[in-house]
Image (spheres, grey):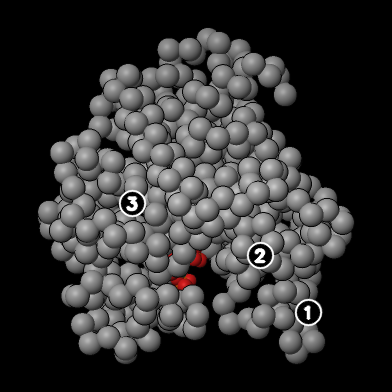
Amino acid sequence: MSYVDEVFDLVVAKNPAQPEFHQAVKEVLESLRVVIEANEEKYRRDALLERLVTPERQLLFRVPWVDDKGQVQVNNGFRVQFNSAIGPYKGGLRLHPSVNLGIIKFLGFEQIFKNSLTGLPIGGGKGGSDFDPKGKSDREVMAFCQSFITELYKYIGADTDVPAGDIGTGAREIGYMYGQYKRLTGLYEGVLTGKGLSYGGSLARTEATGYGLLYLTEEMLKCNGKDIKGKTIAVSGAGNVAIYAIQKAWQLGGKPVTCSDSTGWIYDSEGIDVALLKEVKEVRRARLTEYAAARSSARYHECGEGSNVWTVKCDIALPCATQNELHLEDAKTLVANGCFAVAEGANMPTTMEATEYLQGSGVLFCPGKASNAGGVATSALEMSQNSERLSWTFEEVDSKLKGIMVNIFHNLDDAAKKYGMEGNYVAGANIAGFLKVAEAMTAQGVV
Ligand code: NDP
């Protein structure tokens, strides 16, 4: 049996009931096969793959907090410190009822390669909780965040592990967590990113993932003789990534016509009104029905009505909500409707079958670990600003972000070409991300 297959079987046997983690490992190992086989003896002797798929440390903890009725609630807390070969652990904290260890491990594993691709010195980690901030009062969210950090603060720090936001963790949550960390440690340091601008946050961090997604998409299209201008774009999600992807899509001359949340989706024939979407989602924290109510060109559809954002005719699709939200049937519909490019804003939103179908149909496909890396890259820029006690301008951060995204695309494009898989950006991203980490792990010996 090949080394890749052996390690994949080991992952399934040792990590039962973690299908998302299995899926992420399979996708990565499959596309690394050609690289691994060329170095099989060495990697096998060093157990390089076994070490790569095993987190350096997994923290599981209780998060007790008191709700507004005086009732004690208990959530599960997680932090998976996956790989620190090229820098301190870096990756977001997800607050969503679906969170479990397997999901955090899949995200942490993907983060290793994503962070490597940015070219910046950051290792891979991820964390979160099954706490749901939706429908909670500010005081309840604060109580949860303070309790979460009261346990986690022992294991994080500006030079060891620097968490950030993710689904459910925005500026409000990061603020409460930062305050508690500071109170417990007495340290004013860049331990979290995604901070508010008044206490060490970076300009352009809020926009970074969505903007970065469009910068990379633009470069991918350019290198394939295409352009965003005048193209119809289907976007899923209505959170941080989706909102700023929609904003940048307009700025680059595209027309984003859809967005969605966990209960329904919008088709707006005039294109999504970003200001209204921000008002509904960022200010009112409301459902998309309120967007439709305020705009005559918009139609709202409930989830499960047999349609979704991928049934809308589009040229470019940008999944920006969550994992496994674009299935094989959706991929077939996109191709039938003439969609020629898919770039992932979310982490692993496209199932493996859908990815293979899109690639097999000649659709340009960029995986999230490359196309959504703008968020973590700008988080690393926030770390740099915190270390030098300076704040850069919006333009400075945005231009660095653009440079990083263009560079990421060329790195994965070159890697795909070098290994005889031209145009396979999934393989290119995994190979380019892996090679740097593997070299650092080898240089640092058996640790
Ligand atoms: P937000 O919480 O801001 O928004 C998430 C959006 O997706 C919301 O509209 C939410 O709807 C929807 N959503 C979440 N879970 C589900 C679900 N199970 N089914 C359907 N819709 C769902 O998160 P972000 O925008 O920050 O993150 C989106 C994705 O991008 C995630 O995969 C995240 O890991 C990834 N990502 C985020 C980065 C960042 O900088 N924020 C960086 C890199 C990747 P609702 O409001 O109804 O819950």
Q: Earlier in the sequence, mark 1 or mark 3?
A: 1
Location of residue 434 with respect to 95 vertically, above or below: above
Could you tell me which residue is drawn at 81 percent across and 59 percent down? 182
- The three-letter code of the residue at mark 1 reads Val
Residue 375, given in percent of the width and then of the height, sits at 50, 51
Looking at the rendered structure, which numbered label has been put on residue 66?
Answer: 1
Viewer-side residue, 27 vs 429 = 429
Quadrant in which the C terminus is drawn: top right
Q: Nearer the viewer, mark 1 or mark 3?
A: 3
Residue 112 seen in render: yes
Per the model, the C-alpha gap separating discs 1 and 3 is 41 Å
- The three-letter code of the residue at mark 3 reads Leu
Per the model, the C-alpha gap separating discs 3 and 2 is 28 Å
Residue 146, given in percent of the width and then of the height, sits at 77, 68
Looking at the rendered structure, which numbered label has been put on residue 198?
Answer: 2
In the rendered structure, the answer to whether residue 162 lies left or right of residue 241 reads right
Q: Earlier in the sequence, mark 2 or mark 1?
A: 1
Secondary structure of the residue carrying numbered label 2: helix
Specify the quadrant of the image occupied by residue 46: top right
